[in-house]
Amino acid sequence: MTTQVVKKHMVVAQNASGRNMNVPIYRMKGARPGPTVYIQSSIHGAEVQGNVVIYHLIQRLKDMDICGEIILVPNCNPIGTNIKAGEYTLGRFDPVNGTNWNRGYFFDKDAVEHFAKTVTREESIEGIKQRFRAHLSNAIDNKLSEPWGLGLAQQLNLKLQQMAVNADFVLDLHNGPVSTRHVYIPEYAKDSAKLFNIPHCIFIPNVFAG
């Protein structure tokens, strides 16, 4: 086996007793080159099934000779997972300000349009990707360093987004208590949706809440 598995933790908050609340991060890297895949689950604390999916992925992939790198982030919102009312997990909204845990990722339309104007016909696609990733990563760092105005949900989103910036494929696993097999797909990826062989596709606008 040549696949390396490294587990780390990212501190995202502290509970009332002062103990750190950590997000586990698994990085699996193969000896051969290939794309980078980023998968996270449970940004809404009650959506725990995605954690089971990632657990099974880890057990399967650690014995495989993978190409490239796979970044797996189960239970990416330990704050939401720990918000309980009786036996129920109520991890959909930040209890402090009511913000949806899944609405704080960075997006600046004007900055994207400004970047687009810097692209020339002579520049390679790979060169454009690298420059834009660096541009986005720097913007996220600047946002995180702002001295005020960032709620806990947005801080969490930005830290997760920073890990996903350089990935070629990004999957954010969501689920409900009862549903048919479905997948959310941005409008620009309709053709790619067919590759999943999932019977129901829910198409969302290319611009959706940032």
Image (cartoon, helix red, strand yellow):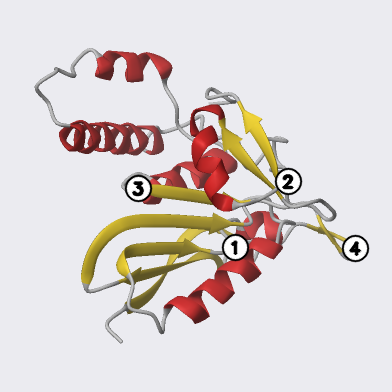
Residue 166 image point, x, y percent: 31, 47
Q: Residues within 10 Å of mark 1 (few under 14, many from 20)?
A: many
Q: Which residue is mark 4?
A: 86
Q: Nearer the viewer, residue 151 or 3?
A: 3
What amino acid does circle 3 point to?
Asp
Q: Is residue 49 left or right of residue 154?
A: right
Q: Nearer the viewer, residue 32 or 97?
A: 32
Q: Residues within 10 Å of mark 3 (few under 14, many from 20)?
A: few
Q: Residues within 10 Å of mark 4 (few under 14, many from 20)?
A: few
**Secondary structure found at label 4:** loop
Residue 131 image point, x, y percent: 20, 33
Q: Which residue is mark 1?
A: 75
**Secondary structure found at label 1:** loop
Distance from label 2 to label 4 (Cα)? Answer: 16 Å
For marks 1 and 2, the one nearer the N-term is: 1
Q: Name above or below for residue 118 compared with residue 33.
A: above
Q: Which residue is mark 3?
A: 168
Front label number (2 vs 3): 3
Front label number (3 vs 1): 3
For marks 3 and 1, the one nearer the N-term is: 1
Front label number (2 vs 4): 2
What amino acid does circle 1 point to?
Asn
**Secondary structure found at label 3:** loop
Q: Is residue 192 left or right of residue 121?
A: right
For marks 4 and 3, the one nearer the N-term is: 4
